[in-house]
Amino acid sequence: MEFDANKPIYVQIADNLCDRILTGEFKPGGRIPSVREWGATIGVNPNTVARSYELLTDRKVIFNQRGIGFFVAGDAIDLIRESERRKFLDEELPIFRNRAALLGINLKEFID
């Protein structure tokens, strides 16, 4: 995993896990790698991964079964999609719309 210096690593890890849930790599109800396993896989300190898991637990995307591990919540896909839609509509779409207007691209050209 390559990291962007402009965004906290733990947030990038959480975003990456959400992407993996959306693509089906990690399925609702399924176990995800432990903090140590994931840290070793992506080459990051386990404390950073733990912070990512805490963020996703707070968002109710994953949950911890004490002594067993972390699992993807049953409604994780819906939660992630709703959050990402909101972020896209509030943050990314206005930038895209402004850039398209500057370049003289209208909606019909975009759709075609």
Image (cartoon, grey):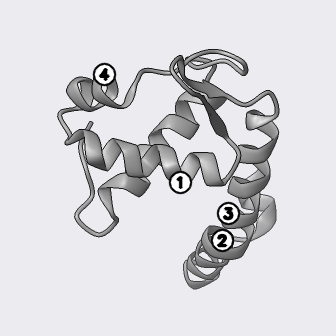
Q: How many neighbours does mark 2 have within 10 angstroms: few (below 14), some (14-19), or many (20 or more)?
A: few
Q: Earlier in the sequence, mark 2 or mark 4?
A: 4
- What amino acid is found at the position of numbered circle 4 in the picture? Glu
Q: Position of residue 53 (x, y in %)?
A: 48, 43
Q: Which residue is mark 3?
A: 88
The dot on residue 55 is: 1
Q: Earlier in the sequence, mark 3 or mark 4?
A: 4
**Residue closest to the far front:** 67
Q: Earlier in the sequence, mark 1 or mark 4?
A: 4
Marks 2/3: CA–CA distance: 19 Å
Q: Earlier in the sequence, mark 2 or mark 3?
A: 3
The dot on residue 37 is: 4
Q: Position of residue 63 (x, y in %)?
A: 64, 35
Q: Quadrant of the N terminus?
A: top left
Circles 1, 4 touching at the beta carbon (< 8 Å) = no
Marks 2/4: CA–CA distance: 46 Å
Which quadrant holds residue 106? bottom right
Marks 3/4: CA–CA distance: 31 Å
Q: How many neighbours does mark 1 have within 10 angstroms: few (below 14), some (14-19), or many (20 or more)?
A: some
